[in-house]
Image (cartoon, grey):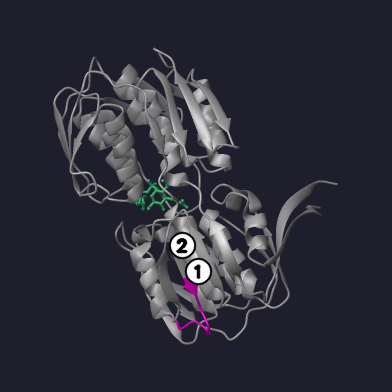
Amino acid sequence: MPSVEVLRVTGGKRLAGEVRVPGAKNSVLKLMAAALLAPGRSRIRNVPDILDVEIMGELLRRLGCDVHHDTASASVLIDVPEQPDTRADYDLVRRMRASICVLGPLVARVGSADVALPGGDNIGSRGLDMHIDGLRRMGVEVSSEHGYLLAHSQGRLRGAQTWLDFPSVGATETILMASVLAQGMTVIDNAAREPEIVDICRMLTAMGAHIDGIGTSTLTVEGVESLGPADHATVPDRIVSGTWAVAAAITQGDVTVLDSQPEHLAIALEKLVTAGAAVDEVEGGFRVRMERRPAAVDIVTLPYPGFPTDLQPQFIALNSIAEGAALVTENLFEARFRFVQELARLGADVRTDGHHALVRGRSALSGAPVEATDIRAGAGLVLAGLVAEGTTTIYGVGHLDRGYAHVVPALAGLGASVSRDQVSDA
Ligand code: EPU
């Protein structure tokens, strides 16, 4: 009989202790793609042990790179050939939307890229129009055929004045990685400012790129003829850090989150203080303590430094057992509220209308089988399971594995009652 993996969480345990945070998923994938910009061996350190890193490794191998991921030292070595291949196949891209990040480096370095149009998370439309518009401004011809995006340029890309309608993380990265090898100057106005963008700018700088305005919404890039490989450590994962912070607050626990940069989470941690937690910086991270039932907190997701959409489901979970009611506004991914239907199975009282959700706190949730539909939905359901009475069985564990390394031992180490089991899928 076929079986599937589930996560079983039995609620009611207060989490306490220390947890370490790995490098950021949403940075490391782009850093690996950036390695394509130079022949030779790049090394990326502080690499999280997650499925998406394996998928990106496989994609780079298909492009002709040698990729060696050493989980013991949390590093990836990437040997990039003089002439990489240019096709990113659908079977990989459909498993990981972030595969699109090879588009900019390939077209900049080899003048050509055929990238399958992405699938990935089920969290809304997620267009590519700004990526394409930016590349076109740099002289790249872009078309789509048979489900593939075809990008070609005659000779070197030309630096250009570009701007984004919205500070898209992915579009900023595509244009940035294309511009570093372009002829002349590129300006990206209304660029994303996420710590992961700063991280990739630092790696590109280490490779020899000239970038001004790092961390601001105007990036100015003076293209260079060639780049060299780099050795770079990935920025800590602020979303994993934030998820642990909510785990501490929701369970009225006391958790120290290490290998973390709390300044990248300022608004989210402030929200936890508003909810009644004590948050203190400690060396190498921060500590969250909660000694009461949380108070409801309103959330509005926005590009960095606004409140991150990737922590929205976790805060809905927190609000679902809080005292009072909270209004949560999602401005990035409309379908992210799909997860509230699953949360409702645990007894949460959440009403959505367009991109708003009204969460009325309940004094208790009750464990039930639920399905994770994307990474952060999975995280939200685990958090709710930690406080629900009885056992919550979470299906769709594969989503969670894409963003959270070794989640069961980490939770168990903090005192949670959690296991990973096979159940029949009849
Ligand atoms: N958008 C467009 N056109 C474009 C690009 C984006 O309309 O050309 C829209 C999208 O449809 C979406 C919004 O702009 O509504 C935000 O998209 P953005 O490009 O900023 O996000 P992304 O690069 O697709 C990354 C992360 C997401 C994270 C967002 C926002 C990776 C691999 N993904 O996505 O992470 O939510 O930035 O911070 O870096 C996650 O980790 O769970 C996750 C979904």
Q: Which mark is residue 242?
A: 2
**Residue with the mark numbered 1:** 246
The reply to whether dot 1 and dot 2 touch (C-beta < 8 Å) is yes
Give percent across and percent down for residue 130: 28, 41
Mark 2 neighbour density, 10 Å: few (under 14) some (14–19) many (20 or more): many
- Eyeballing the image, is 119 above or below 289? above
Give the residue at x 59% y 37%: 71
Magenta region: which residues?
A: 288-296
Closest to the observer, 14 or 95: 14
Closest to the observer, 398 or 219: 219
Give percent across and percent down for residue 265: 37, 61
Give percent across and percent down for residue 261: 39, 56
- Eyeballing the image, is 51 above or below 372? above
User: Which residue type carries mark 1?
Assistant: Val
Visible residue check, residue 355: no
**Residue 293 within the magenta-colored segment of the rendering:** yes
Mark 1 CB in 8 Å range of ligand 1?
Answer: no
- Tell how many labels: 2
- Eyeballing the image, is 198 above or below 381? above
Relative to 408, 86 lies left or right: left
Relative to 91, 190 lies left or right: left
- For mark 1, give the secondary structure: helix
